[in-house]
C-alpha cells in the first residue's frame, strides 16, 4: 500500500511564488481535513486527537495522514521558510502531527509505510541537539523512518545503530568544534563495516571543508535540506554523487 | 595607554590609542594551556588554575582583557543542575549540563539562600580575586554570567522551554525570575571581587531558537532589570544572527553588544544609536578554528568596516584554535 506517494510540494521553498505572506493557507476544501490541518499549523497536540478520532469514523486513515496531517506540516514548513514561524512552532507542529499519525496508525493496525530509514545523532560530548530536533521533525514529516539516537552519542553507538537498522543515510550534528572530531571516526568505522552510506554532517561548528575532508562525508548547510538529501539517498545516490550535488 | 585605559576609553566614548581586542566569551585554547602550564578540567573548577588560564589572553595573545569562566554551568549548577564533564575520550572539553534537568515546567524553581557558596561559584570568585592581584589596573577583568533565558533552558531543558514559549509562556516567568536573580547576584559578587566588566552570555535567547516576540515580551524586561543592577560596564552576547532583535538588545542597558559576524553591525548601529559600543570580528568555528591567519585578518577587516569598535572572536573560541590565528586578530587591532 502506498501511503505517502506525493511529496513534491513538501519542504520546498515557496518564496518565489508567494500569494499570502504571514499566515497559513487552507490546505483542503474538506472542512474536516482542514480542521485537522489547522491543529497541525497551530501546534495543538491536545486538540488534534479528538478531531482525528472523529475523522476516522468516516475517512480512511491514509487520507487523513496525507491530506490533513502532512498537508498541515507542509504549511508549517512554508511559514518557517518565509521567516514567519520560528523553531518552537515547528517543534510543536511536528508533535501535533505525530499525535495524529499515531492515531491513524492504530486504526490501520500497522505503522504507516515509510520511504526509508535515516539514523540521526548529535556528536559525542555535544548536548546541543536543537539542530537534530529540526532534522528529525522534517524527516518525519516527509515520510522517513527516523532512528533518533539523541545527543552526546558515542562513535560506536552510531556505527552499531547503522549496522542494525541499515539506513539509507546517517546524519550527525555538532555545535562545538571539540565534538565534531567524532565525525571522521564514525565515517572510518562505517566504511570498515562495509556501510558506504552518505554521512550528512552539519551544525554550528561544522563547515564544508571539514566534512568533505573524510570519505562518506556530505556537508549539510541547513536542516531544511535533510528531506531532499534523504530522497536522494533513497533513490540510491552514492555519497560521492550527493557530495558533488550538495557541496562544492 | 595600557589595556584597561584603552578599553575604558572606548566604553567612555573617547578615542583609544588603537582598537582594543578581547573576548566577550572564553578565549582559552590548548596551546595557551601549555604555555601557562594550567589545564582543563582544573581550569573549570579550581580558582587558581582558572585565573592562570585567563591570564594567557593577555600574556600569550596580547588581548586587552582577561576573562573567566570558560563554560556556561556556574549558575545552573548552583541552582541544582549537574555538571557534565566536557571530556570526550582523551580530550578535555567544555562542561555542559547533565540530562535530565532538575525541573519540569509545572514546578516552582527555588532560589537557594546560599547561592553564592554553592557549586563552583566560590572558585570563580577566587579566580577573579587572583586575577585582580595579578593585573591590578593594567588589564580589565571580564567576568562572565549567563542570561535569564539560558539559565531557564538549563533548568528545564531547551526543547520543553522552547515549546512553553508558545504553549504556556506565563509558566516560564518563574524560571526567568530565578535565572535573572542568579546572574545578577553572581555579577555583583564578581564585581566585589574585582571584575571591571560583566559579560552576559544568553545563547538561548537567540532568534535562531526563540521567536523575536518571545524575546521582546519576556526576556527583555529581565535583562533590563539585570543590567540595571550591575554597577560596572556590561556586555550582552547573544549567539547567531540577532538582526531581528538587535534593536531591543540595545534597550537592555548593556554598554556593549557582542555580535557574531552573521549579525549586521551596521544594522545594530542604525537601530541602537551612536552610544552603544559594538564588539565582534570573525566566526570562531569556520574561520578562527579552521582557516589561516590571512583569512582571519580579512574577516576582521570586514567586521571593522561594518562598524565594530572592539575586535573579538564572534563567540567562544574553540580550544583547538591555533595561537597564530588569535595573534592575527591583535595585529589587525594594532593597525586601527
Image: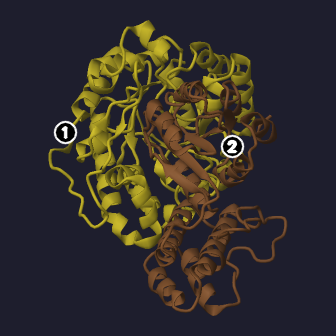
Chain colours: A brown, B yellow
Q: Is residue A174 above or below residue B160?
A: above
The local secondary structure at tag 1 comes to loop
- The picture places residue B252, in percent across and down from the top left corner, at 48, 54
- Outermost residue to the left: B113
Q: Residue at x 67, y 68 (%)?
A: A4
Using residue A204 as the reference point, say whether residue A246 is left or right of it.
Answer: right
Q: Nearer the viewer, residue B243 or B140?
A: B243
Query: Residue B260 got which mark?
Result: none
Q: Is residue B19 visible?
A: no
Q: Which mark is residue A221?
A: 2
Q: Residue furthest right?
A: A16
Judging from the image, mark 2 belongs to the subunit labelled A
The answer to whether one can see residue A176 in this image is yes
Front residue of this view, candidates A237 and A140: A237
Q: Where is residue B102 shown, x and y percent of the image? A: 26, 52
Number of numbered markers: 2
The furthest residue to the front:
A1
Write down the quadrant of residue B197 in the picture. top left
Q: CA distance from mark 1 to mark 2?
A: 41 Å
- Point out residue B60 in the picture as x, y percentages from the top left corner: 50, 11
Subunit under mark 1: B
Q: Residue at x 75, y 33 (%)?
A: B302
B184 is higher (above) or lower (below) than A217: below
Tell me what residue is drawn at x 53 percent, y 36 percent.
B11
Q: Are marks 1 and 2 on the same chain?
A: no
The answer to whether residue B59 is left or right of residue A85 is left
Which residue carries the number 1 mark? B118
**Quarter of the picture holding the N terminus of chain B:** top right
Disc 2 crowd, CA 10 A, few/some/many (<14, 14-19, 20+) = some
- What is the crowding at mark 1: few (fewer than 14 residues within 10 Å), some, or many (at least 20)? some
Q: Residue at x 74, y 45 (%)?
A: A236
Amino acid at each position: 500500500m502506498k501511503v505517502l506517494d506525493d511529496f513534491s510540494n513538501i519542504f520546498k521553498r515557496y518564496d518565489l511564488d508567494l500569494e499570502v505572506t504571514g499566515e497559513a493557507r487552507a490546505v483542503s476544501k474538506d472542512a474536516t481535513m482542514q480542521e485537522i490541518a489547522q491543529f497541525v499549523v497551530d501546534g495543538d497536540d491536545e486538540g488534534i486527537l479528538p478531531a482525528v478520532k472523529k475523522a476516522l469514523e468516516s475517512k480512511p486513515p491514509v487520507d487523513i495522514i496525507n491530506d490533513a496531517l502532512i498537508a498541515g506540516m507542509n504549511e508549517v514548513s512554508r511559514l518557517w521558510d518565509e521567516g514567519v514561524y520560528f523553531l518552537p512552532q515547528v517543534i510543536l507542529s511536528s508533535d501535533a502531527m505525530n499525535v495524529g499519525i499515531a492515531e491513524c496508525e492504530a486504526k490501520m493496525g500497522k505503522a504507516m509505510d515509510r520511504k526509508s530509514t535515516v539514523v540521526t545523532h548529535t556528536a559525542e560530548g555535544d548536548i546541543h541537539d536543537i539542530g537534530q530536533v529540526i532534522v528529525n521533525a522534517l524527516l518525519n514529516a516527509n515520510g522517513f523512518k527516523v532512528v533518533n539516537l539523541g545527543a552526546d552519542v558515542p562513535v560506536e553507538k552510531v556505527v552499531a545503530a547503522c549496522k542494525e537498522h541499515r539506513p539509507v543515510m546517517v546524519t550527525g550534528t555538532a555545535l562545538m568544534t571539540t565534538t565534531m572530531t567524532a565525525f571522521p571516526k564514525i565515517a572510518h568505522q562505517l566504511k570498515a563495516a562495509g556501510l558506504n552510506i552518505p554521512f550528512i554532517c552539519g551544525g554550528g561548528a561544522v563547515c564544508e571543508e571539514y566534512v568533505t575532508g573524510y570519505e562518506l562525508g556530505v556537508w549539510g548547510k541547513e536542516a531544511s535540506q535533510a528531506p531532499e538529501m534523504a530522497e536522494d539517498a533513497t533513490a540510491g545516490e552514492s555519497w560521492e554523487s550527493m557530495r558533488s550535488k550538495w557541496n562544492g | 595607554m595600557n589595556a584597561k585605559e584603552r578599553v575604558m576609553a572606548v566604553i567612555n566614548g573617547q578615542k583609544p590609542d588603537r582598537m582594543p581586542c578581547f573576548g566577550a566569551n572564553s578565549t582559552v585554547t590548548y596551546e595557551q594551556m601549555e604555555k601557562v602550564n594550567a589545564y582543563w578540567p582544573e581550569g573549570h573548577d579550581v580558582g587558581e588554575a582558572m585565573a592562570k588560564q585567563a591570564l594567557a589572553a593577555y600574556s600569550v595573545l596580547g588581548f586587552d582583557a582577561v576573562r573567566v569562566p570558560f563554560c556556561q554551568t556556574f549558575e545552573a549548577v548552583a541552582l541544582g543542575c549537574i555538571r557534565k564533564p566536557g571530556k570526550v575520550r582523551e580530550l578535555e572539553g567544555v562542561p555542559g549540563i547533565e540530562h535530565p534537568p532538575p525541573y519540569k515546567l509545572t514546578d516552582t524553581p527555588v532560589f537557594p539562600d546560599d547561592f553564592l557558596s554553592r557549586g563552583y561559584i566560590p572558585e570563580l570568585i577566587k579566580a577573579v580575586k587572583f586575577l585582580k592581584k595579578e593585573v591590578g589596573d593594567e588589564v580589565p577583568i571580564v567576568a562572565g554570567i549567563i542570561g535569564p533565558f539560558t539559565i531557564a533552558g538549563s533548568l528545564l531543558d531547551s526543547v520543553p522551554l522552547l515549546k512553553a514559549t508558545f504553549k504556556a509562556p506565563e509558566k516560564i516567568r518563574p524560571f526567568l525570575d530565578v535565572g535573572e536573580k542568579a546572574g545578577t547576584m553572581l555579577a555583583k559578587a564578581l564585581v566585589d571581587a574585582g571584575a571591571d566588566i560583566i559579560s552576559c552570555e544568553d545563547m538561548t535567547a537567540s532568534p535562531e531558537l526563540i521567536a523575536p516576540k518571545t524575546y521582546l515580551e519576556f526576556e527583555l524586561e529581565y535583562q533590563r532589570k539585570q543590567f540595571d543592577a550591575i554597577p560596572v560596564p556590561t556586555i550582552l552576547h547573544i549567539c547567531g544572527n540577532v538582526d531581528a532583535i538587535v534593536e531591543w538588545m540595545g534597550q537592555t542597558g548593556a554598554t556593549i553588544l557582542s555580535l557574531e559576524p552573521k549579525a549586521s553591525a551596521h544594522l545594530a548601529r542604525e537601530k541602537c544609536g551612536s552610544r552603544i559600543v559594538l564588539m565582534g570580528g570573525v566566526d570562531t568555528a569556520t574561520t578562527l578554528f579552521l582557516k589561516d591567519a590571512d583569512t582571519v585578518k580579512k574577516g576582521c577587516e570586514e567586521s571593522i568596516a561594518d562598524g565594530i569598535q572592539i575586535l573579538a572572536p564572534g563567540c567562544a573560541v574553540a580550544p583547538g584554535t591555533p595561537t597564530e590565528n588569535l595573534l592575527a586578530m591583535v595585529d589587525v587591532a594594532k593597525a586601527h
